[in-house]
Image: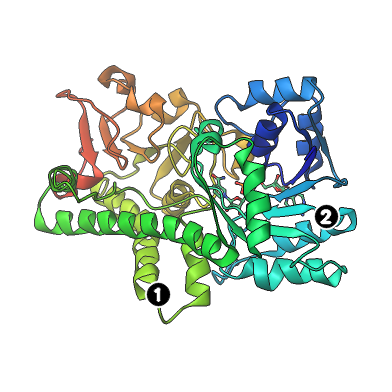
Amino acid sequence: MEKICVVGLGYIGLPTAAIFANAGYNVIGVDINERVVETLNKGEIHIEEVGLPELVKKVVEEGKLRASLTPEKADVFIIAVPTPIHEDYTANVDYVIAATKAIVPYLEKGNVVIVESTIPPRTMDDVVAPIIREHGFAPEKDIYLAHCPERVLPGRILIELIENTRIVGGVTPEAAKKAADVYRAIVKGDVIETEAVTAEMSKLMENTFRDVNIALANELVKISQRIGVNAHKVIELANKHPRVNIHLPGPGVGGHCLAVDPYFIVEKATEESPLIQTARRINNSMPHFVVEQIERMTTELPSPKIAVFGLTYKGNIDDVRESPAIEIYELLKRNTRFDVRAYDPHVKQEQVSFPLSSFEEAIDGAHLVVILADHNEFKNMKAEDFAAMKTKVIFDTKNCIHIEDENVTVYKIGNLYSVKAIQE
Ligand SMILES: NC(=O)c1ccc[n+]([C@@H]2O[C@H](COP(=O)([O-])OP(=O)(O)OC[C@H]3O[C@@H](n4cnc5c(N)ncnc54)[C@H](O)[C@@H]3O)[C@@H](O)[C@H]2O)c1
């Protein structure tokens, strides 16, 4: 095996392409976005990921990785295009269909085709395989078709792509083996062969497990506010039990995985998935819950100035997709009483449709800082960093600020029963 064609050069496809290139393969990266292709061919990258700029620069300079708008013949094709949801919460597999159709003219007997995109159960068998068949190949013997879901953590992608256990689901057992061998060349973790539908479901259940457990923690936040107990303390103590691991509550669940993947199951088994659906509803309710708390805190101020800190869906990344922080910002903007500023050291202006503020602009004269992402920049802040605020009150929805100072009031999402209206 010599050449790999990676289709879709985003957070998953680009690091994957770079790692295979660094392992000595000739890699062609394909994307429909011209800017992505031009940037990569200059040895630069368009996303933020630890260690990736250096790795891409190296492999592009060595001629091992290059980008193109169109696929080429290769031994292995890896599809890593987006799989978002439609407005009605059904899966949008159009990108996977388009990418599969785009590679078909370049396929030859014996090629391996791997879909890394997260897909609803049975997509390999019912959607991808028929496209291959329509073009005259038998997915049972001509082309080795497999699904290998991705489970990396943004910020650690280059490490986890190598170290994580990989699940490889083949449309046939031979396809599972051939595709697994592709990963065995770069992965230090186990590479486990299974059927395509089992791989599809295992990926979806991983994220659903986390979504449901975060919903439980978020429900605990609401219960704690009603009862008058600190939810973070409750979690800390309950987790001293050797078999309990209550997750962390927060302002909602975002990203293109946890906030999306459970719907792929719900779509295929609606009546059988009431728990998954309830968890989604609870997590979707959190931005409104956070805004209600902000309204409680600022009820006595005629024109509260609110500084939103952090717009990404989690800390130390630049990804704002499905971010509850964006929803919170937009909900706050709807209240004409509020003067809202948004600051995020990881987010660039072109990523959002509203003006971003600098740290100084956001904090100057603010009545309230609302922390919505646990970036390191926020975790390390000290009381004096908030000196320019009018009233020094922080609402930390991520439990990441550690300030004990009599001049600064810090409310955590776990101790909301203690909130008092801010006085000017
Ligand atoms: N990012 C993660 O942490 C993560 C983790 C696990 C699974 N996934 C899954 O991996 C898949 C890819 O996610 P991502 O975060 O890399 O997405 P992304 O949006 O960062 O990148 C996708 C890229 O594909 C390109 N593209 C779209 N259609 C194309 C086509 N027909 N041909 C060529 N390129 C095309 C886009 O221009 C974009 O550059 C999704 O299914 C996602 O759910 C992502």
Looking at the image, is mark 2 or mark 1 nearer the viewer? 2
Coloration mode = rainbow
Q: Quadrant of residue 272?
A: bottom left
Please state the horizontal and vertical placement of residue 219, each as a whole percent of the image.
Answer: 25, 59
Residue 291 vs residue 323, the one in the foreground: 323
Residue 207 or residue 287, whichever sits in front = 207
Are circles 2 and 1 on residues that touch, CB within 8 Å?
Answer: no
Q: Which residue position is annotated with label 2? A: 103
Nearer the observer, 207 or 305 = 207
Q: In the rendered view of the protein, which quadrant contains the C terminus?
A: top left
Image quarter in which the N terminus is found: top right
Quarter of image, res 393: top left
Give coordinates of residue 20: x percent, y percent.
Answer: 69, 34
Q: What amino acid type is highlighted by mark number 1? A: Ser
Q: Nearer the viewer, residue 333 or 15?
A: 15
> Which of the two labelled residues, at mark 2 and mark 1, occupies the earlier sequence position?
2
Ligand 1 contact, mark 1 (Cβ < 8 Å): no
Q: Is residue 100 above or below residue 232?
A: below
Give the image location of residue 252, x and y in percent: 38, 52
